[in-house]
Image (tube, helix red, strand yellow):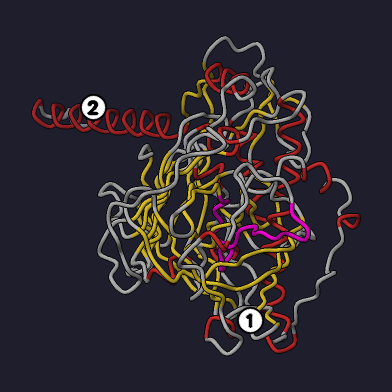
Amino acid sequence: MAQTPSPILSFFLVLALLLSFTSVSNSIRDHQHNSYQIFDVSAVIQKTHQVFTQTPQAQQEEEARPTITATAQHNSSVLSFSLHPRASVKKPQHKDYSSLTRARIARDSAQVNSLNSKLEFALSGYTQADLKPVPTAVQPEDLETPLTSGVSQGSGEYFARMGVGRPGRSYYMVIDTGSDLSWLQCQPCADCYQQTDPMFDPSSSSTYRTVSCSAQECSQLQISGCSDGKCIYQINYGDGSYTMGDLATDTVSFGNSGSVTDVPIGCGHDNVGLFVGAAGLVGLARAPLSLPGRLRATSFSYCLVNRDSSSSSTLDFNSAPPGDSVFASMVRNPKLDLFYYLDMVGINVGGETLSIPASVFQVDGNGRGGVIVDSGTAVTRLNTQAYNALRDAFKKYASDLPSSSGFSLFDTCYDFSSVGGSVRVPTVSFLFASGKRLLLKPSNYLVPVDGRGKFCLAFAPTSSLSIIGNVQQQGTRVSFDLANRQFGFSPNKC
């Protein structure tokens, strides 16, 4: 005959059941909390309309007048450029937001091609001695559509306001973590594109010096030549764009935060391609000729505002990462020490860690694969296996959202035109080897492709190099801690 539990035992059984139920309830609530976020659709759509009406930054500003003088040997001072989205500098010349998006995607594809070209060159076995400048490398008529459509707007979505020369004159320059040498268009110009600022005249700078063919800087160029004792540089991009001219050194000024002398810079007299609007490019890659390399910077960081915004932020050197940063290690590709590789190991969607082998995100023995952080690429490219897993999981958790047809390289889109305000969307997080995770905001992975409410999942597949693009970086202070070989990601630090 079964015995009736004692009152005390019954009490503890009930208590255990209550605690278990509470734990399960909390677990469900935590999962629900970590699975979805609220996305303010109407605010984003409003920005797509404002991009055509906002007043661009002044096309000419006063000369930079640094209040302190820094040197490349002493890098304790924090140096800072102002940083602007392209739309705030040069008003888009498109009939609607859909055509603007297509132009941005065309520029983005060109950037990805350029990065992959650099990687393939490094893996090809060629040496610098095999390459010499070719004045007629690419002719303007060789730039066919869709590249021609991009020529009217230019490459790069974010411009640093950088001072060059002494006295300093400020120029809008594309920032690019995938390039080493900084360069700008120079007078006299044999072939130049349209830029926002007046063209740089080297004769107006008292600190401008051409570099000799025997100088160390000349030997550090990927493609170099010699003319009348002067070092000639040439940089080719994967889309057919190129710049060629004299390798020189000059003073670079950082607004009112300081200046640095003898910075290597390309003085381009022959420039063709997708750079319209910008005066040139700021190279931020891991290389001796890059700006961080020449400054011997211990770190640099930037925060990219929404590309449709009229606001700005900063590109800082030698500043400490914010204390609330999510840190992840930098890893190196033994075949190419130019890009900034990230120790990403996984992706979480809707609270679910996807079944993707960590090896999918790693550099293989041949130097291929891996994940880099790049300021010049917009849309994040993921290894096809990782992309398919992310897309399928997102569709599963977003099954209640109104789907729409694809758009250009995007195959997963939604129609939010009937949404009056906000909508609930699945979360997306990047996972790092340290066990830390970076939770993305909805605007970092759902982007408008027209002005009426069509949004697409801002990822694309790739069979080669995976790239964390600037759409996923917007609104986050991204720190490149070179001294400690780690990244720091701190949301809302623009």
Residue 54 within the magenta-colored segment of the rendering: no
The residue indicated by pointer 1 is: 230
Which x, y percent locates residue 411?
A: 75, 38
| Residue kind at label 1, given as amino acid type | Lys
Segment colored magenta: 173-192
At horizontal 69% and vertical 56% (from top left) the residue drawn is: 112
Which x, y percent locates residue 145?
A: 87, 46
Q: Is residue 174 visible?
A: yes
C-alpha separation, residue under disc 1 versus residue under disc 2 = 82 Å
- Drawn side of residue 290 relative to residue 234, left or right: left
Residue 349 vertical position relative to residue 144 in the rendered view, above or below: above
At horizontal 53% and vertical 32% (from top left) the residue drawn is: 57
| Residue kind at label 2, given as amino acid type | Leu
Q: Quadrant of residue 56?
A: top right
Which x, y percent locates residue 124?
A: 73, 81
- Drawn side of residue 403 relative to residue 183, left or right: right
Element type where label 2 sits in the image = helix
Q: Is residue 372 visible?
A: no
